[in-house]
Structures are given as C-alpha cells and as structure tokens.
C-alpha cells in the first residue's frame, strides 16, 4: 500500500488555521456542508494535506475517510501543494496524438512523482492539463510561464536541469 | 395498499414497499447484489432491474418505492430484456474481477458466483480489457482486503459506517480508479478499525476475509510434543450448523464437541466456563462499585470490538469499563495455570486455541493479557466459526452424522447464564442472575429470567428493584447504537448502574466471524433473532445450572484455586486494564 500522504512537510501558519476554523464555524451546523468547507480550506492552504483534512473531519464530526473520499473524487481538490516550478503536460487532443503520453511518462520517471504530486524538496510539481492552445507546437509542456514545444522524451532531462 | 401486477398476475401490496420487497412478499424473487436492507439501499449494481409499465428504462427494484401512482401497473421481473441486462451487468463486473475462484476463500458462498450461475453467464471473459490496479491490505491482525475481488457494492462501507458508526473504510478516487480503502490509503492497522468483521460478513465476494489461522492449528495438532486444547464461544454453536446445511438457528453444541474431538484436540473446553467466571468476577465488581461509590455506570468488557472502540473513540469512558477480561481470556488464563497444574502438563507445551464468532478475538489475544506467571499468553490462536467449518470439511468429518458429544470438565461445563452471553442482553441477564442473588441474601429462588433485556433492539433499558433500591440497566449492540447510549450517559440524560455493550448488532450470534449468510436470505430473515433463539433454548434446557454461581465447575475452581471472586489470585489472572489509543478515525 502506497501511503498517499504529502511528500512535503506541512507548514500551515496560525493565521491559516484561524481562517480554517472560521470557515468550519460558518458551516458546522449545516447538513451536508463538507463541500464548501473543503473548498474554503483549499483556498486557504492551496491544497488539502492530512493535517487539514483531520481538523475538518474532527470538527465536522465525520470520519476522515469520508473527507478523503470526497477530496479524491473531485479533481478540483489537491492533496499536494504546487512546487516552486509547476510542470504542466498538455494532454489536449493534438498533444495527445503527438505523444504527450510518452512525455508525461518520462517526466514521471525523471521526477519520481505522479500527476498531482510534488518532489520532496518542493521544487517541482507535476500535473496533466487540458489544451493550452499551442496545438501547433504539440506536444507541449509548460514550466511556470515557460513553454516548451515539439518535444521528444530525450529533451526532458535537459529542460529540467535548467531549473 | 397498491394493486399492481407482477408478470401479468395481480397482487395487492403495501404502499411504500420497494418493488423488490413487494415481489418477495408475492412469492417472486428478484436477484440483487449491492442491496443490504436498511443500510445499503443505493441502487448501484443494477442487478435487480425490472421492466415497469410507463417507465422509460429498466428500473432498479431495490430503491423504487411503490405508491398510489403505480396503481394497476404491470411489472415484469423476468423478460428477455431484463435477463439480458442482468447478465451483461455481471459480465461487466467480471471484466474487472480477479476470477481466481477455485482458490478463493469465499468460493461456494460467493454471491457473485451464485448470480453468474443463476443468470446463466456463459462467458466470463466477454468484456476482456484492462483491470484496476489493486493492492492487498493484510496489515490488521484479523482480516485482509483483496480489492481485485471487490465489486464496489459498498456493503462493507455501509456496515462500517451505519451499523458501527466507525467509517474507517470508504470509496476513494473515482471511475475506474475507485477503490475501497482507508483515508490516504493508510493500512487498516493504522486506523481506528475496531476489528469487528461486520464488513466481512457484509461482503458478497472474497474481497474481504478473516486472516486464516487454521494453518497454525493444524501444525499444533500434528505436533506430538504439544498439548492442544480448544474452547468454543457460546455463539459458535448457534451458527456453525449453517455451514453444514442446518437451518439458521439450529443449536449444534453436541456435534461441535464431537467434531473437535475428531479433529484431534487433546481437551475440549467450553468458553461458557469462562463466561461463568466472568459473571462471578463482574457481578462482584458491580456490587463493589455500587456499595463503595465506585465509578458508575459499569460497562461490560467481553466484546473486544467494543473495548477497542472505547479506547479509540471514548477514552474518557475507560474508567467505566469492567476490569474483567473476556471469557475467552479467562478460560485461557485458567487453562495455563489451574488446569496445567492439575493435569501436570507444562504450560509451555500447551497450545490454547479458541473458536470464536468474532474476528476481534484475533486481535484480543495479542493484547497484553498475560497469565499469572507473565510468561505465557492466555491464548495462542483464535479462529472464527468459519475457519472451524473449513477445518471440519478438510478433515473429512461428516458433521451432520456426528453423535452429540460433551466437553471436558472442569473448564468445560457452563451454566444457562453463560450460553446466553452470545445474544445481546445475555451478559446483562447472566450478571443480574448472580448479582440479584447475592444482593438478596443468596436465596435459592432468586429470579432466573430478566426478559426485558432480551431482543434485537439496538438500545434496551430496564429498571430492577432489588432490596428496595432501583438498579438501572441498559443494553446496546452495534457500535452506532452504543454511541447513542454513551452520549446520553455522558450528557447525564440517563443515569445508569450497569451497561452491556456488544460491538456487533444483536451480539456475538451476529459476530463478524460467524457463518456468512448471503444477502438474499439476510435481507428477509433476522439472523440475530433466529440464532439467539437457539441460545435461549439451550439456557432453558440446561439441567446443570442456569445461574453462573450454581455451576459445579465454577464452585470447583474457586474452591481449589481462586478462593473467591475478586481475590488476589483472581485479580492477577482474570482482570486487565485499558489504555486510550490515538489512531486515525
């Protein structure tokens, strides 16, 4: 069993915690209000690590598994923060047919993480995204604002080395 | 009433029933898979579909409730379209199913297998393709989960959350990646799972199963150096027969004892003896707490699932738990001390096995309950009713043809009070039989039956006036019900002296280690009540004693060894402690 806990240590501030409890207080007595609480929490922290989900579960009086089940069901929720460099692989139709799958696999191997993951040093995060509108350059990846097009798997390590 | 037609024939059925229930009442079976009455009514699997007049598509009969708007409608339960749809649904389930049926723990009792046979699935590989990647979680002491055999029906999730109020398992991810697991894919052992096994008996396939410890028992039985003793819990005799074709609720105490002898155990004991010991100690503890202003209400501690729940979810209530070990552990402790001494067998040579209706007992034997010398564990192996049935099969014993045998004494005879431990309210009644006798001057005609605490309701309360003083008691079974009761105790809404809590709904007769009853039967028969009847009949017909303190074995062991309830020796061997745990809830 691969434990799906976040690779990067949790560094929530007292301010964030206060904001989280405020959101919880607002919805505590409302039936079925787990979704808005989770959305609020993600806005505060940017992601929903076990530390945050545990507080939500305890305060809302539901099992942690119930919270986690919802978080993993909806793609809008993230279990990991974004890295210093956000690597996004376009999986739009054009990129996909030009080999985006191979590019993604190469990135997964080089970084040692799955989409939605972050490297333990917090440097890179990886995600697959929908069409970014650069179909002429397919297959395309973005690292923060930098766009790399017409890629082959061999170029990936050289690109990552620049960061 | 609503007048409807099933397959063209008119039936009058009660409004509010689902189509599936109404059909059953009208003598027509509609197959189902994900439906567990009362707890999992989600219409997810689509096995129970039917054709209904006026409906645009097939209707899931387990969730469609009939109303006056359905008056006169014809429902077809077995049209070609219905049968084809059910078959295709099964084939789609099989496309993502690990079809290693021959070696599966549930082979023969699998509901998926039975449906395939029933609906004529002729090609299990019709939809061949990718399968979801799955892991096996065997981290817990009592069970494993093999999701390659999971059909995502969520019956286990419903049992955990709704019956037990625990909810440590659920559906993670979505679509093809959906998997029943714990939060953050934690191993089950790291969660506040109470080991009750209700998920196992809810599972229609072999995805969930107890850890099979029969290998350890066979090994001991084949080792000439070892003296292998066995004890069987009260509830086992109420359900073991089902594995060999006996109707639900058939008591098979005598055949069970004979089967254990044929398996080669050197001594066959009865946990009923341990149950009587528990009553002696617990009744004594209750009276002491009442007379000396001790912590009240006192709560029973026989159910290891409940004990684990209390440690994880209600640590503030731990002082209320009786310090008595469970009957299993008491029997074990006496075996390796008193019995070992008496028979001259070195405790180190003894392999002590228990047969339990319970998966949490596998966890309980690893608790720090040590015998007097502190060297030997009270128990060495704990197997479930299901594992014993498998051993009997493997040994080629013709269970149904066995003559009625008996147990070895002492440690083998129990009172009627002991045998009802297996039903919710039984421990309470057994304790009252002895406590009231004690409090009323040990009169031989003190009351025997306390029927107010019997029955399958989740929470029961009663007041008994003893010597002009009211004793308030309550009984809860199923941890979700226990939670309701505990909250009332904590808030002060209920003032009680004594509480019995059993983790499993209906008590041990419906334990997580019992013979699995398929949903087609479970949805329409109250197995808790049927099995409990078997135990109450054994109690009524017990010629030896109906109160624990009257049991000859009990009198002997106190006279020869333990002196009196609550003695120093009794405390050393028969009592234990608890501590709060911090596990992921």
Image (tube, rainbow, N blue to C red):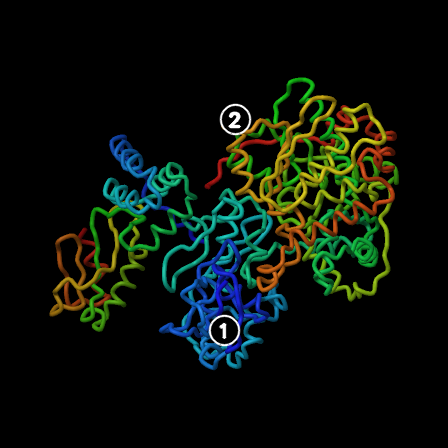
Q: What is the x, y in percent for residue A106? A: 28, 63
Question: In this image, B105 relative to B562: left or right?
Answer: left
Depth order, front residue of B142/B26: B26
Q: Pinpoint residue A153: horizontal percent, then vertical percent.
A: 24, 66
Q: Quick one: SS at disc 2?
A: loop
Residue B475 lies, with reference to residue B23, above or below; the image says above
The mark closer to the camera, 2 or 1, is 1
Query: Is label 1 in a helix, a strand or a loop?
Result: strand
Q: Could you confirm whether marks 2 and 1 are on the same chain?
A: yes
Q: Where is residue B549 shown, x and y percent of the image?
A: 82, 33
The numbered dot on residue B351 is: none
Residue identified by numbered label 2 = B492
- Between A155 and B459, the one nearer to me in the picture: B459
Residue highlighted by disc 1: B5
- Of all chains, the one bearing label 2 is B
Query: What is the x, y in percent for residue B121?
Result: 52, 78
Do the CB atoms of the residues marked 2 and 1 lie less than 8 Å apart? no
Q: Is residue A57 left or right of residue B399?
A: left
Give the alpha-carbon distance from disc 2 to disc 1, as whole Å.
Answer: 53 Å
Q: Nearer the viewer, residue B295 or B106?
A: B295
| Vertical arrangement, residue B217 with respect to residue B98, above or below | above
Q: Residue at x 71, y 24 (%)?
A: B287
The numbered mark, 2 or 1, whose residue comes first in the sequence reads: 1
Identify the subunit bearing mark 1. B
Which residue is painted at 78% across and 27% down in the image? B565
Residue that appears at 87% across and 30% down: B560
């Amino acid at each position: 069993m691969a434990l799906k806990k976040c690779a990067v240590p949790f560094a929530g501030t007292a301010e964030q915690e206060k904001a989280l409890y405020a959101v919880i207080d607002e919805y505590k007595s409302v039936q079925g209000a787990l979704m808005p609480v989770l959305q609020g929490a993600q806005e505060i922290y940017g992601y929903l690590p076990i530390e945050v989900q545990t507080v939500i579960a305890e305060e809302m009086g539901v099992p942690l598994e119930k919270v986690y089940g919802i978080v993993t069901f909806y793609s809008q929720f993230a279990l990991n923060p974004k890295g210093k460099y956000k690597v996004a692989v376009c999986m739009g139709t054009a990129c996909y047919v030009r080999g985006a799958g191979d590019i993604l696999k190469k990135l997964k191997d080089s970084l040692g993480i799955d989409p939605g993951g972050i490297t333990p040093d917090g440097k890179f995060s990886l995600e697959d995204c929908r069409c970014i509108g650069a179909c002429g350059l397919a297959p395309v990846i973005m690292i923060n604002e930098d766009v790399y097009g017409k890629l082959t798997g061999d170029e990936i390590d050289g690109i990552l080395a620049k960061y | 009433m609503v007048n409807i037609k099933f397959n063209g024939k008119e039936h009058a059925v009660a409004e509010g029933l689902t189509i599936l229930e109404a059909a059953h009442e009208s003598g027509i079976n509609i197959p189902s898979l994900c439906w567990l009455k009362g707890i999992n009514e989600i219409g997810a699997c689509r096995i129970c579909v039917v054709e209904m007049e006026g409906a645009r598509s097939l209707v899931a009969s387990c969730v469609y409730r009939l109303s006056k708007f359905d008056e006169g409608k014809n429902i077809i339960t077995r049209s070609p379209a219905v049968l084809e749809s059910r078959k295709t649904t099964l084939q789609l389930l099989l496309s993502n199913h690990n079809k290693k049926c021959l070696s599966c723990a549930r082979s023969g009792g699998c509901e998926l297998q039975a449906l395939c046979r029933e609906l004529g699935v002729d090609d299990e590989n019709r939809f061949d393709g990718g399968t979801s990647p799955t892991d096996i979680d065997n981290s817990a002491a009592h069970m494993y989960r093999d999701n390659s055999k999971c059909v995502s029906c969520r019956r286990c999730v419903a049992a955990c959350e709704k019956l037990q109020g625990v909810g440590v398992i659920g559906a993670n991810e979505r679509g093809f990646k959906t998997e029943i697991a714990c939060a953050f894919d934690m191993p089950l052992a790291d969660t506040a799972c109470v080991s009750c096994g209700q998920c196992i008996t809810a599972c229609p396939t072999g995805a969930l199963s107890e850890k099979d410890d029969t290998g350890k028992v066979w090994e001991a039985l084949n080792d000439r150096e070892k003296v292998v003793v066995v004890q069987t819990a009260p509830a086992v005799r109420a359900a073991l027969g089902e594995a060999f074709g006996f109707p639900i609720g058939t008591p098979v105490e005598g055949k069970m004892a004979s089967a254990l002898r044929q398996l080669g155990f050197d001594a066959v004991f009865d946990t009923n003896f341990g149950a009587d010991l528990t009553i002696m100690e617990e009744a004594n503890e209750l009276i002491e707490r009442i007379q000396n202003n001790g912590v009240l209400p006192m709560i029973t501690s026989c159910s290891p699932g409940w004990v684990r729940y209390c440690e994880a979810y209600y640590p503030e209530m731990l002082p209320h738990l009786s310090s008595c070990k469970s009957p299993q552990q008491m029997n074990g402790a006496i075996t390796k001390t008193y019995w070992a001494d008496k028979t001259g067998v070195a405790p180190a040579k003894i392999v002590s096995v228990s047969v339990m209706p319970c998966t949490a007992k596998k966890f309980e034997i690893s608790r720090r309950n040590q015998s007097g010398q502190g060297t030997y564990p009270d128990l060495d192996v704990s197997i479930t009713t299901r594992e014993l049935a498998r051993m009997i099969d493997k040994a080629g014993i013709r269970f149904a043809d066995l003559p009625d045998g008996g147990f070895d004494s002492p440690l083998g005879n129990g009172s009627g009070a002991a045998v009802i431990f297996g039903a919710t309210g039984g421990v309470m009644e057994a304790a009252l039989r002895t406590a009231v006798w004690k409090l009323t001057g040990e009169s031989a005609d003190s009351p025997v039956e306390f029927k107010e605490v019997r029955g399958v309701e989740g929470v029961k309360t009663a007041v008994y006036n003893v010597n002009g003083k009211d004793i308030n008691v309550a009984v809860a079974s199923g941890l979700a019900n226990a939670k309701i009761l505990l909250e009332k105790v904590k808030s002060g809404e209920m003032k009680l002296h004594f509480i019995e809590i059993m983790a499993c709904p209906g008590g041990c007769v419906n334990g997580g280690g019992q013979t699995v009853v398929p949903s087609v039967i479970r949805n329409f028969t109250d197995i808790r009540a049927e099995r409990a009847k078997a135990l109450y009949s054994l109690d009524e017909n017990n010629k030896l004693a109906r109160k624990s303190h009257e049991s000859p074995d009990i009198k002997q062991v106190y006279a020869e060894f333990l002196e009196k309830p609550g003695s120093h020796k009794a405390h050393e061997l028969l009592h234990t402690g608890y501590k709060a745990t911090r596990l992921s809830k």
